[in-house]
Image (tube, rainbow, N blue to C red):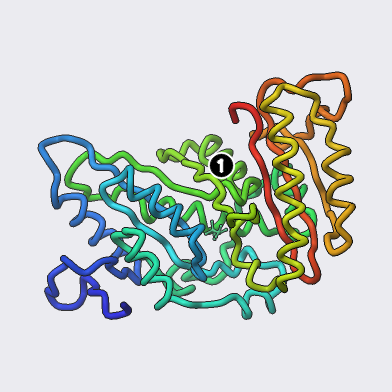
Amino acid sequence: MNSAPSPHDGGTPLAPTRPLLARTVAELRTLSARLLEEGAVGGTPRRLALVPTMGALHEGHGHLVRAARAANDVVVVSVFVNPLQFDDPADYDRYPRTLDADLELLDDAGADIVFAPEESEVYPDGPPLVRLSSGKLGEKFEGASRPGHFDGMLAVVAQLLHHAGPPPLAPVPVEYSAYFGQKDAQQLAIVRRMVADLAYPVRIHAVPIVRSPEGLALSSRNRFLSPEQAEAALVLSRALFLLRDRAQAHEPLMVDDAEALIASQPLVDLDYLEVVDPDTLEPLAFNCRETPFTGTALVLVAARVGNVRLIDNMPLGDS
Ligand code: PAF
């Protein structure tokens, strides 16, 4: 798979091998412009999508790419382990780099181009001096235990959205979208806010969480759970399903019941369970016994199971 042709291979034909591998921004733009041009009909806009990832891909990512594939003409997937979003350098070093396996999964899921740059391509002058701030949205929940994580995430997402967007010499009009997993709900809310606040010309799509048949949200961290811990971790999704069912029935959520359910599982150490506004992530006061649920909300949950920190969430209402 690493033998995917690059535009600098001296005229190697671009088709039919997929996905094409771009190591530099220049290669990415050349490939993207060519694929946008191939199959263009008159002035009909072509649909271009970016799916940003850090590699070590699992079926949850496959689902994201398939969602992008189903609605777009050209699908770019970035694979870049971004050092700026790791608060612990040892975690960054340990993060699995599995490009060959990733390319196979991406081929299967229908990606057209994989943008897998070196760090020197993304941060040619070293860590950027000017940083984006995720502000209040990035300080709470996951941000509270990983200071700087969301600012570092924004630093790379802002660049990736720019690099993978319609190439400057795009031969046709382009409609540009980017796909993020609902699993990282706080990241999604922060990216949406950045795109709105900085007027990025891209539509952000959220792709629903993929769960095991038992309900566990798919995550690359699940591989570190023992079978007993994986079983115990199911209490998180059970708590979310309980709240979803009450919301659907327009009953009071009674969040205490969900907390008590999680507390009943000794292997699970709850960090937070909060019902928030999906856009601002501000807590909502739905925990009252008398008030039936209406409107939209998002339940966020995080817990430690052994040494593994798990997050999960559930949109409620029409959110
Ligand atoms: O969700 C991720 O994998 C990463 O945070 C992202 C969006 C690819 C940025 O590095």
Choose between 106 and 210: the one closer to the eye. 210
Q: Is residue 52 left or right of residue 316?
A: left
Specify the quadrant of the image occupied by residue 113.
bottom left
**Image position of 171 with respect to 105: above or below:** above
According to the image, label 1 marks what residue? 194
Choose between 278 and 136: the one closer to the eye. 278
Choose between 261 and 109: the one closer to the eye. 261
**Image position of 135 with respect to 212: above or below:** above
**Image position of 55 with respect to 76: above or below:** below
Percent from the top left, x then y, of residue 152? 62, 59
Percent from the top left, x then y, of residue 21? 31, 70
Percent from the top left, x then y, of residue 302? 76, 53
* Amino acid found under the numbered disc labelled 1: Met
Q: Is mark 1 within 8 Å of ligand 1?
A: no
Label 1 packing within 10 angstroms: few (<14), some (14-19), many (20+): some
Quick one: quadrant of the N terminus? bottom left
Instruction: Classify the position of ligand 1 by quadrant: top left, top right, bottom left or bottom right.
Output: bottom right
Residue at 70% x, 20% y: name it.
294
Percent from the top left, x then y, of residue 193? 58, 38
